Image (spheres, rainbow, N blue to C red):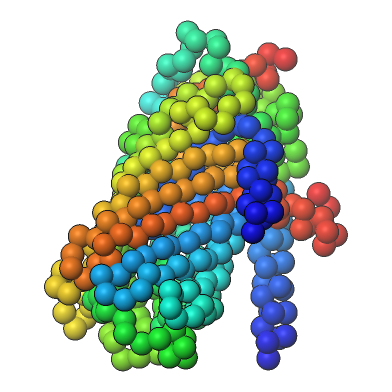
């Protein structure tokens, strides 16, 4: 009985892992920031030194899916693409904040606002490179 | 013992020095779920000193996994030891949290469902529900009394700038006894001490700390809803992000009623394995 339970738990765990990993990246044309959010300006724009913290945060929070250089992995978008870089700071901030959970992108609203803006700054550096 | 302590300290010290933010709450849940594919292992404990009876220590291990961006699952294993009595295994819990709404809102709801395969010796106090009863039986007796329970929570949580406000309403049903439904609550407010991330690695800087306060307690049950004969606690909470993937939490809780423990000390150490799901999928032959 105990062995059966243990087997069931292991199978359930493996299924959950596969479920979490099964979705590959697909662009979502409906994932757009509202105009008001897209118009927001980065309050750290005049503080270029804040971008260094953004790089650190990007490596921790984003690189796992988007790659160290943001060039995208199987599950997540290439952040260097013009269609990403053409979006306003406010739009990128909104996407980081809300995520797109049905496509596997989690919300990062747990990060303080300043840190989300720092990540936007680093994304701009990735685009420039 | 010394070797174990030295190993634990060494592990903390050698962990990498990046920073991140973890909720400091110990009892209250906010709306932030585990990122999909990440696995977090947490070793925690509750140290209590009842007004009558011996002090006790209730350690527990949590294994939390982000199944999807809207579903986090968690397994608990717990035990308990009482001074002058014995140490016993008190059971397991399987918890699930679901995020019904796609976007961030002013108030974000999370639905929580938990099955508990416990016995009556459980004392981790992850939720305080129903009425408070002083314990007189030994662990040997209590550990033989099953407490199979269903617990649900409505979690409401808001991020207002850098502050988090969270409230939980708890309903619990013991399937092993005719107790009716029991109710409880937990609420908390917290914020990080530093909101900007520095460029370099730092361990002791403000950005790695967050702090707040929780209040939690029982609300009686279907046999009598309210504050009568219930336990309530006020508890400052602090979390220290030791490294990019590990956090220490500490919370001294102070009893607010005669039926509360005067003090509850809670602490925990969590370690997050990012991309755990990807690694497992690779081991199982997935194309990643």
Q: Is residue B234 left or right of residue B3?
A: left
Q: Residue at x 68, y 49 (%)?
A: B7
Furthest residue in direction top, as rendered: A46
Q: Is residue A8 left or right of residue B64?
A: right
Q: Quadrant of residue B255?
A: bottom left
Nearer to us in this view, A98 or B219 = B219
Q: Quadrant of the N terminus of chain B?
A: bottom right
Nearer to us in this view, B87 or A58 = B87
Q: Residue at x 55, y 71 (%)?
A: B77
Q: Is residue B223 above or below residue B275?
A: below
Q: Quadrant of residue B246?
A: top right
Q: Is residue B285 left or right of residue B228?
A: right
Query: Can the viewer see residue B156 in this picture?
Result: no
Q: Position of residue B117 (x, y in %)?
A: 50, 81
Number of numbered callouts drawn: 0
Query: Can the viewer see residue B262 in this picture?
Result: yes
Q: Residue at x 30, y 59 (%)?
A: B263
Q: Is residue B5 above or below residue B219?
A: above
Q: Is residue A11 above or below residue B148?
A: above
Q: Position of residue B95 (x, y in %)?
A: 50, 67
Q: Residue at x 68, y 87 (%)?
A: A2
Nearer to us in this view, B150 or B49 = B49
Q: Position of residue A108 (x, y in %)?
A: 51, 39
Q: Is residue B122 above or below residue B109?
A: below
Q: Position of residue B269 (x, y in %)?
A: 54, 52
């Amino acid at each position: 009985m105990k062995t059966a339970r243990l087997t069931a738990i292991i199978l359930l765990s493996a299924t959950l892992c596969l479920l979490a990993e099964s979705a590959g990246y697909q662009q979502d044309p409906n994932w757009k920031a509202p105009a008001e959010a897209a118009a927001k300006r980065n309050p750290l724009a005049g503080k270029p030194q804040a971008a260094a913290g953004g790089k650190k945060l990007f490596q921790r929070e984003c690189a796992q899916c988007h790659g160290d250089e943001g060039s995208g992995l199987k599950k997540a978008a290439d952040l260097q693409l013009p269609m990403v870089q053409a979006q306003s700071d406010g739009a990128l901030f909104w996407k980081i904040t809300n995520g797109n959970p049905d496509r596997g992108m989690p919300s990062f609203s747990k990060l303080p606002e300043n840190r989300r803006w720092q990540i936007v700054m680093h994304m701009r550096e990735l685009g420039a490179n | 013992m010394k070797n174990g302590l030295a190993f634990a300290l060494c592990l903390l010290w050698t962990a990498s020095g990046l920073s991140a933010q973890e909720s400091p709450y110990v009892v209250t849940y906010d709306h932030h779920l585990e990122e999909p594919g990440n696995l977090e292992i947490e070793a925690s404990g509750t140290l209590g000193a009842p007004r009558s009876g011996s002090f006790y220590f209730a350690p527990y291990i949590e294994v939390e996994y982000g199944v999807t961006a809207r579903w986090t699952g968690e397994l608990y294993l717990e035990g308990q030891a009482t001074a002058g009595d014995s140490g016993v295994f008190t059971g397991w819990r399987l918890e699930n949290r679901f995020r019904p709404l796609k976007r961030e809102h002013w108030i974000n709801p999370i639905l929580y469902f938990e099955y508990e395969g416990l016995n009556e010796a459980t004392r981790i106090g992850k939720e305080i529900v129903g009425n408070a009863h002083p314990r007189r039986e030994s662990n040997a007796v209590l550990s033989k009394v099953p407490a199979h329970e269903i617990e649900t929570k409505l979690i409401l949580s808001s991020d207002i700038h850098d502050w988090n406000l969270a409230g939980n309403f708890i309903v619990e049903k013991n399937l092993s006894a005719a107790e009716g439904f029991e109710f409880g609550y937990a609420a908390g407010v917290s914020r990080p001490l530093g909101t900007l991330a520095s460029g370099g690695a730092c361990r002791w800087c403000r950005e790695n700390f967050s702090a707040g306060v929780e209040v939690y307690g029982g609300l009686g049950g279907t046999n009598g809803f309210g504050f009568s004969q219930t336990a309530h606690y006020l508890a400052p909470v602090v979390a220290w992000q030791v490294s990019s993937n590990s956090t220490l939490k500490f919370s001294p809780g102070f009893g607010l009623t005669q039926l509360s423990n005067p003090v509850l000390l809670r602490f925990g150490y969590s370690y997050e394995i990012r991309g755990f799901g990807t690694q497992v999928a690779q081991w199982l032959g997935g194309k990643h």
